[in-house]
Image (spheres, rainbow, N blue to C red):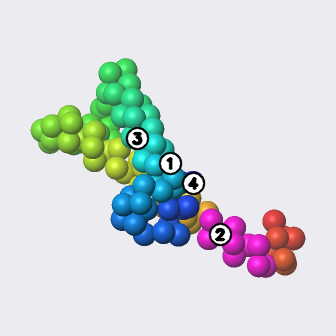
């Protein structure tokens, strides 16, 4: 998702969708794949793991429906990855401009 979303950042998403550009279809495909993988992982966690602690357990204990809990947790999982990717990209850019710091590392 992160690779395709960064390419999509160069063109307004609505335009890419309207023109059915390849970057749009690649983004759609990767998004569907990421959502499917995240949902499968969460289903496995709900089935196989003892959820006595943590966010999922607290949400379920608060009687938030399982489907709503899944949507929220999946959004958090994917958003965290995106945020981490952008932060790492910025860090590497700044590091690439500072030879002295590179030598220290």
Instruction: Give the distance between the C-alpha atoms of the residues marked 1 and 3, in whole angstroms.
Output: 10 Å
Instruction: Give the distance between the C-alpha atoms of the residues marked 4 and 1, in whole angstroms.
Output: 10 Å
The magenta segment is 89-98
> Is-magenta flag for residue 91?
yes
- Mark 3 or mark 4, which is nearer the start of the sequence? 4
Would you say 76 lies left or right of 9 here?
left
- Find numbered disc 3 in the image and state the secondary structure of the residue it sits on: helix
Whole-percent x, y for residue 19 in the image: 41, 60
Instruction: Give the distance between the C-alpha atoms of the residues marked 3 and 2, in whole angstroms.
Output: 29 Å
- Residue annotated with mark 4: 3
Instruction: Give the distance between the C-alpha atoms of the residues marked 4 and 3, in whole angstroms.
Output: 14 Å
- Pick out the residue farthest to the top: 48
Nearest-to-viewer mark from 2 and 4: 4
Q: Residue at x 34, y 50 (%)?
A: 75
- Mark 2 or mark 3, which is nearer the start of the sequence? 3
Would you say 88 lies left or right of 49 here?
right
- Residue annotated with mark 3: 32
What label does residue 26 carry, if any?
Answer: 1
């Amino acid at each position: 998702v992160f690779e395709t979303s960064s390419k999509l950042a160069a063109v307004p998403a609505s335009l890419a969708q309207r023109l059915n550009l390849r970057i749009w279809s690649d983004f759609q495909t990767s998004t569907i794949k990421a959502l499917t993988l995240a949902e499968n992982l969460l289903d496995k966690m709900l089935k196989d793991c003892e959820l006595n602690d943590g966010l999922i357990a607290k949400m379920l204990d608060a009687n938030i429906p399982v489907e709503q809990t899944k949507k929220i947790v999946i959004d958090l999982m994917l958003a965290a990855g995106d945020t981490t990717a952008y932060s790492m990209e910025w860090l590497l850019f700044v590091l690439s401009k500072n030879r002295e710091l590179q030598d220290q590392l």
